Structures are given as C-alpha cells and as structure tokens.
Image (cartoon, rainbow, N blue to C red):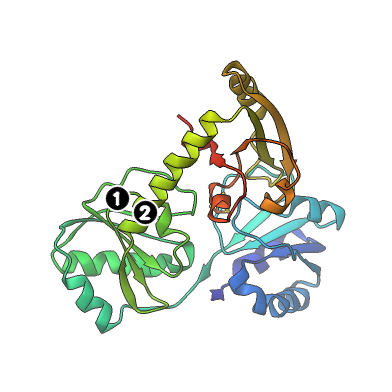
Amino acid sequence: MFADISEAIKEIKSKDYKNILIQVPEGLKTEVSRIASKLEKECCVDVFIAAEPCYGACDLPLKEAEISGCDIIIHFGHYDFGVKTKIPVVYVPVEIKSELTEKLKKDIEKIEEKKIGIYSSEPFKRLLESFGDYLEDNGKEVVDKKIILGCSKFEPLGELNIFIGSGKFHPLALKGKTYFLNLEKNRFEDLSGEIMKEEMKKAARVSKFEGAKKVGILVSTKPGQFYKECKQLEDKLREQGKKTKILIFDMITNEKLMGLDFDAYVNTACPRILDNPFDKPIVNLRDLP
Ligand code: SF4
C-alpha cells in the first residue's frame, strides 16, 4: 500500500500547525511510524498516532484529537465521507499497485454479458480506470463505474457487476449477478450465490425483529455513524407496540450486548457490523420496511 503525503505536507506547512493526529487503515499500520517521523522531520510538528482500529472515514478520531490538543487530522486511505468537523481533516488517498494477469484476462473473456457495471475500493482507483478501458476495447459496454464502500447501496445498471480489488467486504455490498476479480488470489469468482444468501439472511432477520416485543436501538458515537433521528425512530417503534430503549456505544459488539434483556436490536450504525455473529436477532435500520 502506497500513500503520497506531499499534499498533506504542503497543507501542514501552509497553516503552521503544531500538533498533528494521523489515522491509517489496517493495511498501512506497518508504515505508520515511518510516516509520522517523516512528517515530524519535514514539517517540524509533533505527531500523534490514532491507534484504535479504523474502518472508514466515518470513524474519524475527533475525541482523540481534542484530548491530545491536535490542530489537524491527517486521515489515510478513505475519501471524505461528509462528516462535519470543527477540526480540519486532510484525506490522503492510498494506492495498491496491481495489474490484470493473463489468467484473469482469459477468465474475463468467458463472460457473455455485454453491459457491465464495474466497481472497486479506493486503493484500486487507478486500476478501475484502466480496467474499464480494457473491457471497452474487448467489446463490452461499461454502463457504471464507481468506487464503493462496504455500506454503499444502489441499484446495479448492468447485466453483470464486476468488483476488482481484494477482500470480499466491498463486493458483498453489491446486488444481483456479481463477479469478484480477486487480485490478491488471482481468481475470478462468482459471488452471486453468496450475495443471494446474504439477502435471505437479511429477510430472516427482519422477520424475527418484527416479532420482537422489547427492542434495543443501537446508536454509535462514531462521527459518521451517529444516527441523529434515533429519538424519532424510537417513537415510531413505540407506535408499533414495541418497548424500546436507545443504547449508545462507540463500537457495537456482541460482547457488549450480553446480559441485556432485549428480544432484538435495530442497528443504526455501520451496516457491516452484522458480518459478525450476534446471539440475539439484529437488523439494520435500512433493511426495515
Ligand atoms: S459505515 Fe461501515 S461500511 Fe460504511 S464507510 Fe463506515 S465502516 Fe465502511
């Protein structure tokens, strides 16, 4: 994983910041002390490192910045999620250099669909561009091309989705017929069955939730995940005859719910929390009818 910090250096120098908080994704952790030393040396600043796990730009370390007296956050690996902050935040993209192997090209040749939607995650942004050109040169029509998040929700425009990148976290957010161009494992995998299974699990969770009487509303304090309308949601669920309470967390985990006497939960934070096992029925707010 590669990060170009020249823009961040320019920004720090231009405003005369003194204390910097840097936050990196898991894949850049081995580089973080080197990045911190470079910023200290080139910008004459003190650098703090946000060490809690970070899953996206929805998860900015605002409390840590305030407590440590930092004047700016440098966030690596994700683009601006739209979180409003008092403290300035600079977003530094990261790149994973990769290319299509001959084996993958042969697998792609077997695709019969013509209209294709192509998707990827931020570190593969450049490759997504060249992959689109490659498909067009080989007789396909690229009808959609986007960087997506694990929580992205949209209707696919093509007859087939292809996600190019590594890890299933992002492609499982897609809907419909989907292939995963897995660059890490050099495989072209059909994920349509797994996506359909996820849809069935979702329907089963919603049905259990609808039968629950006592419901916990899960709210996260993470800046980009906090659900401001939680009180209105509570009113709505009470009108439906449910007994409810609002529960506030930073990270929502099964362990933290143990011992609580609710029949089921509605999650208003990151929908991918449900990729982890939970003992009680739990449904994402966005999946409720
Ligand atoms: S809400 Fe979840 S899936 Fe969406 S950006 Fe944040 S961590 Fe990623």
Say if mark 1 contacts mark 2, CB within 8 Å: yes
Taking 251 as reference, is 233 left or right?
left
Residue 203 in view here: yes
Taking 135 as reference, is 67 left or right?
right
Q: CA distance from mark 1 to mark 2?
A: 7 Å
Q: Which residue is mark 2?
A: 195
Q: Position of residue 233 (x, y in %)?
A: 61, 26
Q: Position of residue 246 (x, y in %)?
A: 71, 32
| Residue type at tag 2 | Ile
- For label 2, count other residues whose C-alpha is less than 10 Å away and answer few (under 14), some (14-19) or many (20+): some
| Dot 1 or dot 2, earlier in sequence | 1
Residue 253 in view here: no
Of all residues, the one furthest to the top in this rendering is 239
Residue in front for this viewpoint, 168 or 205: 205
Q: Residue at x 31, y 57 (%)?
A: 192
Q: Quadrant of the C terminus?
A: top left
Taking 1 as reference, is 227 left or right?
right
Of all residues, the one furthest to the bottom in this rendering is 102
Residue in front for this viewpoint, 23 or 89: 23
Q: Which residue is mark 1?
A: 176
Q: How many marks?
A: 2
| Residue type at tag 1 | Gly
Q: Residue at x 51, y 36 (%)?
A: 208
Q: Residue at x 13, y 64 (%)?
A: 139
Where is 158 relative to 128, above or below?
Answer: above
- For label 1, count other residues whose C-alpha is less than 10 Å away and answer few (under 14), some (14-19) or many (20+): some
Query: Considering the numbered disc 1 on the image, is that residue within a helix, a strand or a loop?
Result: loop
